[in-house]
Amino acid sequence: MKNKYIKLFCIAIVSAVTLTSCDSGFEELNTNPNALSKPATKSMFTLAEIYMDGQDYSNTRGNNAYAAQMVQHFASLGGPGSKYSYSSEYSASLFGESYGKGLNQIFQLMSVLPNTPENTNMIQACRIMKVFLFQKLTDTYGEVPYFEAGKGYNGNIFAPKYDTQEVIYNDLLKELDEAGDALDVNKGFVGNADLFYQSDVTKWKKLANSLMLRVAMRLSKVDPAKSKQFVEKAFAKGVFSSNAESLVLKHEANPQGVKTNPITSSWVRNDLNAGDGNTKYSKTFIDLLKNTNDPRLRIYAKLEATGDNNPASQQGLANDAKEFPGGDKKKFSDPNTSTVLRLDAPTLIMSYAEVQFLLAEAALKGWNVSGTAQQHYEDGVKGAMGILTIFGDKVPAVSLSEYNTYMTANPFKASGTNAEKLEQIITQKWIVLLFNGFEAYSEWRRTGYPVLVPVNDPSGETNGTIPRRLIYDQSELITNAANYKEAVQRQGLDLMTTRIWWDK
């Protein structure tokens, strides 16, 4: 976050606290004690953005230690994600934090925001953020409370029913379609209280359409007709067209835990241990980048103990490892604390590169998204390399010459089979989704790429198969038992091996 956002952030925190309190005095007798008479809606909006992609709790547990290890971005000795063992805390982290923070903040804001023309852009932005959060939730668990979620503010519903994933997806697409159209460049917004795009409504429209593209492609196997319809609609409306439109949230290095990057800060504080930690890059990830002479490796990785980011020195840990080969943890690659693991490293929430890979897949299917699969693929790789400039200048950026050399050595398989082409596209998406374990996990389940060798560890819950979902927050068995049981009866047992609706 830039300095001008610090004050907005602090006001947002104060506003969130204030929402849980009430004024003293005679006015209490005639006002709702749980509502603000003059809510600080802009500050509430800022906090909604900060919460949208999760905080330390869910990112440390559900993202880095669970989903990202299941898709072999990272590996950890005895880690539940690497070994597919069940941890109630890790598995439930996204569920609890999304409803308790991200969605809670959005629902609070929408409950106090007057539905007037001057608020239309804030309302539509809230709808878009709500879709982002709910897609991550339903992709991770399957059926989740959706339509009745947040109704505690105005409907007194504190045990919301679960909705089927099909119904949720239909509404996600509707919400993005409507919200994107309703955003109005001629109306006001929130100024610099918008940390994402500084109230650039055109970029918000492109975010809505790019997210629609992601949501629609998730249906490619379970409902290909609807998938095609909304992929083409999203493209026609206008999606990200450059790295400048990627969704990025900036952070600051101090104070820790307040403005620091929630994906990296706990890792730096607790897990890195000067290179002597148990969590490292996966051998799968490091080997792929080394074997293809990928110029991104020097930016992504280094040996923390020595500061060595030479690609030739990098070594990943096998996900099935029970000890460090050679016994020296410091010889295995860590995320680079000069770049991607800085405390103030920006969060790359959704990138132009990801959009290009989605379009490459659509073009491969023959859908109407203009250009060829190869063109979108090559633009995606270039965008994925170029976006790394957001992580600073302590490590040289990937040059155009390096990109050209890489593409010459690793060309798109234009004469290959569709399966070979799709594998290339999704594997490149898997690379750019580093630190976005939940999305990489969803795409692996949808496509089967990249090809991963499963781990069969005695501590695992899946008999040596990569999990297909995470297990619900088990507090639901106490606070929302009837609705939980109904969802499990429809969807299947609450196990890591149960496939969700779109996972065919």
Image: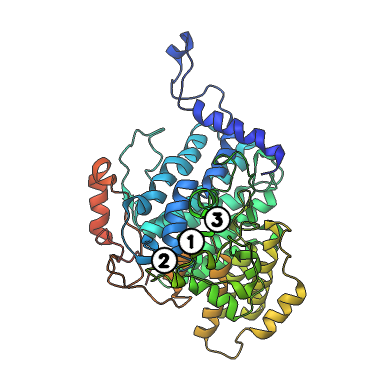
User: Which residue is drawn at the image coordinates 28% and 45% (left, top)?
Assistant: 476
User: Where the C terminus falls, by quadrant?
Assistant: bottom left
Q: Residue at x 25, y 56 (%)?
A: 488
Q: Is residue 214 above or below residue 37?
A: below
Chain-order first, disc 2 or disc 1: 2
Which residue has dot 2 on it?
Answer: 70
Residue 274 lies in what quarter of the image?
A: bottom right
Say what amino acid the circle numbered 1 marks.
Gly
How many residues crowd around disc 3 within 10 Å: few (fewer than 14), some, or many (20 or more)? some
Does 492 sit left or right of 324 as displayed?
left
Determine whether label 2 and label 3 are within 8 Å by CB.
Answer: no
Residue with the mark numbered 1? 437
- Is residue 475 rendered to the left or right of residue 387? left
Give the vertical position of 80 relative to 294 (above or below).
Answer: above
Real-space CA distance between mark 2 and mark 3, rounded to the nearest whole angstrom: 24 Å
Q: Secondary structure at mark 2?
A: helix
Marks 2,1: beta carbons within 8 A:
yes
Q: Would you place residue 266 above or below residue 495 in this image?
A: above
Mark 2 or mark 3, which is nearer to you? 3
Amino acid under disc 3: Ala
Location of mark 3 (residue)? 274
3D distance between C-alphas at marks 1 and 3: 23 Å
Residue 354 location (% of width, % of height): 59, 66
The local secondary structure at tag 1 comes to helix
Q: CA distance from mark 2 to mark 1?
A: 8 Å
Residue located at (40% from left, 58% from top): 140
Q: Position of residue 254 (x, y in %)?
A: 62, 40
Q: Secondary structure at mark 3?
A: helix
Residue 145 tag number: none
